[in-house]
Amino acid sequence: MATLASSSSVLFSSPSNTNYLVPSNSQLSPSQRLSLSSSSHLSSSLSICPSLSFVTLPTRCSRRFVNPACSFSVRASAADKKRVLIVNTNSGGHAVIGFYFAKELLGSGHDVTILTVGDEGSDKMKKPPFNRFSEIVSAGGKTVWGDPAEVGKVVGGAEFDVVLDNNGKDLDTVRPVVDWAKSSGVKHFFFISSAGIYKPTDEPPHVEGDVVKADAGHVGVEKYIAEVFSSWAAFRPQYMIGSGNNKDCEEWFFDRIVRDRPVPIPGSGLQLTNISHVKDLSSMLSLAVEKPEAANGNIFNCVSDRTVTLDGIAKLCAQAAGRPVNVVHYDPKAVGIDAKKAFPFRNMHFYAEPRAAKDILGWQGTTNLPEDLKERFEEYVKIGRDKKDIKFELDDKILDALKVPVAA
Amino acid sequence: MARLMVVQQQHKTPLSLLPSSLSDFNGTKLHAQVQFKKRDSQPKGALQVTASSTKKILIMGGTRFIGVFLSRLLVKEGHQVTLFTRGKAPISQQLPGESDADYTDFSSKILHLKGDRKDSDVVKSGLSAEGFDVVYDINGREADEVAPILDALPNLEQYIYCSSAGVYLKSDLLPHFETDAVDPKSRHKGKLETESLLALRGVNWTSLRPVYIYGPLNYNPVEEWFFHRLKAGRPIPIPNSGIQITQLGHVKDLARAFVQVLGNEKASKQVFNISGEKYVTFDGLARACAKAGGFPEPEIIHYNPKEFDFGKKKAFPFRDQHFFASVEKAKSVLGFKPEFDLVEGLADSYILDFGRGTYRKEADFSTDDIILGKSLVLQS
């Protein structure tokens, strides 16, 4: 039975980091937003820490923890400690998921190894989140590098209870990991898939169970995992923000706003998308680790519970930066531009809701885009990106075609 | 340039779309739903809603749309149901698809209390003379009409109010949840003020906030607007991009939700969004209406409303913005589960209403012709 007395400092980061703002358009609900597990085996630990009463207030508070390891999840008792392997991609939007997930699991007392694809010494490792992997190590996690096709060898024959594949997009890449996991006695296999596999629909949002594109690589992987493993779950994310991100998201907007450049958005700007703080994804994955029986056999849209329009993102980024914004809409075909290259979000409604996670795992979202973007902007300025010399070739081509002047 | 086309319509009967158990509103399937029998997915911690003891129920209104379906459900449950109306419309009318036996039974049991709810003296005296256990306020718009009802019924067990998702403050972040900011200046501020008054008065209240309601007997031209154009073989003019997202909820699902909150502790002093589980784009809604009515795929014309002057007329029945609300609170707390998905629900409306030649408003294509007459239309 875990005793919490010594670990109360782990449960809460310094109170000065908490920020109980009540934004008027907050999407936060008054219900508790803590990942205090409802699992019965952890409930015995709850009474010990006196400060818990502080955080159970039904306030519209947002979690402002700088260190994502300090989530509210209660430390796992020795009996519930799980040995988790994360197979992590070495680049792209999803890279940061493994980083947060590793730290959250470590904070909850689990054993974590993160296997990053490729070489430790590669240039890719100089970028976030990889250049912050010392945080995983100092939290007690193991970091290894190698080829997931040889995962058994790379982890040196170690055994695990849970594997999360946050790397493969197709069966060729993930199959060796699944097969090894099965043969080495892994009990639960989780997979980071993608909400991009849903078939476009007249009736949003994408809900778990909706039709997916049959030929999508991730679909083949989900099917295979379900065939091989008796305990599995797949998570379908969209876009995410958070410190340590490997791929630009909100930065695309900040780059333009901070330089007083127009923000060119294809189409009407009413297209809906979803941006989650990566800690929401991490907390969902952690719940699945804590409640694998509940998670078993399910697809989870791994997204926050609010959607936002493309225009809305521009507006919120501008508010976060404390600057005005000039959005310019354009028709990519008319301008002769490939919108995929010119703009970081899909030029269509791309909107999934996390209904299964809420129903089945009791998950709650904490993403608060207005507040989260403020934090992101602070970091954006802190690293000096606002002063960076950036070329806006595609923007200029668009604005030229529309005859929109660019501020000097 | 004239865009009016005469289309040879292959009118396929949409009956195949409708599971037969849903084609009328009576019968055991409905009863089972309302009785909240054990389902596969029990909402967490939900109480089994056992059939409430017989209540003396007053419905404010009840002769037009929601009330027509709600009153039938309540009467079938065995409650004594009275409609408070001015008596301008018949207290009961046989519904399309309703059997003679069912209608006879209903019309013999439904009661009427005549009065004008704007006359607070009449309301007070009429209601206190009768004494009711529960009030369903289906047609209330202003808070000052509620006070006399509460004054007349000091032992009221529950006041169940039909509010509106129109009270939510417009936001960049959707869907609307019940906890979101509301707009004290909106067109629906009377609804907000009513909710506030109910809370202030300490009565056991429940408020349901529907989005756009549709279904047979709809007096708001929602689906009817599309059906008129589809039937006439006309293109459907939709403002701007057509990707604006809205949300429709079937009136029968709403009526069921109203019954689910009756005597339900979990609904005490709570607000619930009630609508369909999925949302829909404007363009998608045009296509869904076509499917539901067995019409061919419609021609959609997009236009910029700013380029036209329609005078006082409304060129399109929906607000030109994203507007949708999450129903997950109702689902998890009440076990609310819409029976109709969009196409099924529109088919139900078509089969029982428009498809039989009945509708509330005559077709008026004057704004369409203004739009189509101009050559300046956006590419769809």
Image (tube, coloured by chain):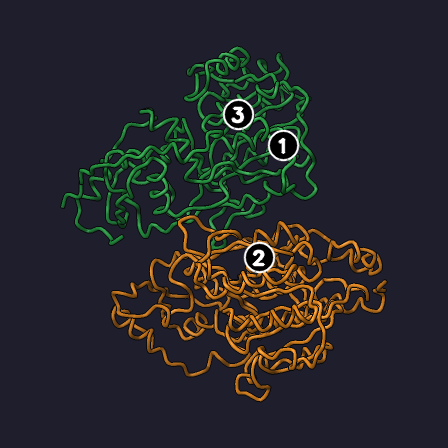
Chain colours: A orange, B green
> Where residue A291 sits: x, y (%)?
70, 57
Secondary structure of the residue carrying tag 1 is loop
Q: Is residue A208 above or below residue B224?
A: below
Same chain letter for marks 3 and 1? yes
Pointer 2 chain = A
Q: Is residue B15 left or right of residue B109?
A: left
Q: Is residue B13 left or right of residue B377?
A: right
Residue at far top of view: B108
Viewer-side residue, B57 vs B88: B57
The quadrant holding residue A200 is: bottom left
**Mark 2 sits on what residue?**
A300
Structural crowding at the residue carrying mark 2, measured as other residues with C-alpha within 10 Å and reported as few (<14), some (14–19) or many (≥20): many
The quadrant holding residue B194 is: top right
Q: CA distance from mark 2 to mark 3?
A: 36 Å
Viewer-side residue, A249 vs A301: A301
Q: CA distance from mark 3 to mark 1?
A: 16 Å
